[in-house]
Amino acid sequence: MRELTIDEMEQVDGGIGFHGAVMGAAAGAIGAALTGGGVAEIATGAMFGAVSGFFGGIGGATVGITRGMFSGYSLGTGAIGTRAVYEMTEQRRYRYNPS
């Protein structure tokens, strides 16, 4: 095995978190929209999805304890975002239909 040159490191460095964030934002927004969420719920889903995807992308690109740490961040953020969107949707539904 040989060491990478600076040029080779720049070619493979970065972008992992960004691509994960884009995919996570799309998944969060689509999920919130499909469950009947309004603009606030869709934006919240996209935000939490982006953070979750960012950490998931980094977790997938690392090894060992770092992979576990970033994957845990990803799962935790995704769970918090899911709960936040659910609560917002339920509050909106109750506000307009308090029966």
Image: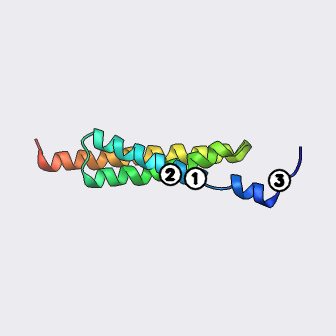
Residue 27: percent from left, percent from top? 41, 43
Disc number for residue 70 = none
Disc number for residue 17 = 1
Report helix, strand or loop for mark 2.
helix
Q: Which residue is mark 2?
A: 21
Q: Which residue is mark 3?
A: 4
Report helix, strand or loop for mark 3.
loop
| Residue at 36% over, 47% down | 29
Which quadrant holds residue 33? top left
| Residue at 15% over, 50% down | 95
Give amino acid for label 2. Ala
As measured in the structure, the alpha-carbon distance from the residue carrying label 2 to the one carrying label 3 is 27 Å
Circle nearer the N terminus (1, 3): 3
| Residue at 30% over, 47% down | 87
- Residues packed near mark 2 inside 10 Å, few (<14), some (14 to 19) or many (20 plus): many
- Residues packed near mark 1 inside 10 Å, few (<14), some (14 to 19) or many (20 plus): many
In the rendered view, would you say 95 is above or below 34? below
Circle nearer the N terminus (2, 3): 3
Give amino acid for label 1. Gly
Quarter of the image for the C terminus: give it.
Answer: top left
Q: Is residue 64 left or right of residue 75?
A: right
Q: Are marks 1 and 2 in contact (CB under 8 Å)?
A: yes
